Amino acid sequence: EIVLTQSPGTLSLSPGERATLSCRASQSVSSTYLAWYQQKPGQAPRLLIYGALDRATGIPDRFSGSGFGTDFTLTISRLEPEDFAVYFCQHYKTFGQGTMVEVK
Amino acid sequence: QVQLQESGPGLVKPSETLSLTCTVSGGSLISYYWSWIRQPPGKGLEWIGYIYYSGTTDYNPSLKSRVTISKDTSNNQFSLRLTSVTAADTALYYCARTYNARHMDVWGKGTTVTVSS
């Protein structure tokens, strides 16, 4: 069973800063099945990135995904106020535990 | 655009069966996988299982003995049945459209289910 470990657990940043979120798999996985989601309080998750690096429809280009094998990254180039949320990575049937991006 | 809406009882007694339905509007079940995911209060996401439009299913091994996902193509719905529930099954339950069994691109708003006597 693949385990996805996200780090850090919480990221404290200011608007305009760059956010780098990590998702590490317990064994090498296919990038095709690697996705990232954003979840705000009281809302369902929203697909941001699929196939490790493709942005979903309507997702701003400040969001980017990268990585392969066991190490994947979600980068938010310049944080906007609406980007403060929890982010989950997912591979096939497994989700990471999430990273909260909070206002510093 | 495609929208999903979960429905079902918000309160289920321990040892009884949880039953939820997801209604798909603005599209059909054809050519997609349809998933159930849950989120216990204050915790992360757990994949429960999915059904393909052909009827093929796959379930989380940790829940497999208690879960059934079915579909009603004529009514554009798919359903979740979870038997012998305990307090550990208390969660926000989401249905989602799943592309090629990979990522979930459309989500319902979720419905809260509490297991309590």
Image: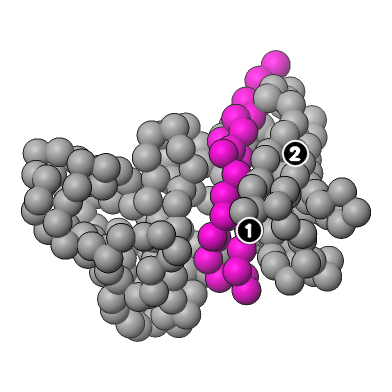
- Answer whether residue B111 is magenta in the image: yes
Residue identified by numbered label 1: B97
Q: Amino acid at mark 1?
A: Arg
The residue at 87%/57% (across/down) is B73
Q: Is residue B94 left or right of residue A6?
A: right
- The magenta segment: B92-117
How far apart are labels 1 and 2 at the CA level? 16 Å
Between residue B108 and residue B9, name the one nearer to us: B108
Identify the main secondary structure in magenta. Answer: strand
The residue at 46%/38% (across/down) is A43
Residue at the right extreme of this rendering: B74
Label 1 lies in what chain? B
Q: Is residue B62 visible?
A: no
Q: Earlier in the sequence, mark 1 or mark 2?
A: 2
Q: Amino acid at mark 2?
A: Leu
Image x and y of residue A66, in percent: 28, 76
Q: Residues within 10 Å of mark 1 (few under 14, many from 20)?
A: many
Q: Quadrant of the C terminus of chain A?
A: top left
Give the number of the disc on residue B20.
2
Q: Is residue A8 left or right of residue A35?
A: left
Give the number of callouts: 2
Between residue B110 and residue B18, name the one nearer to us: B110
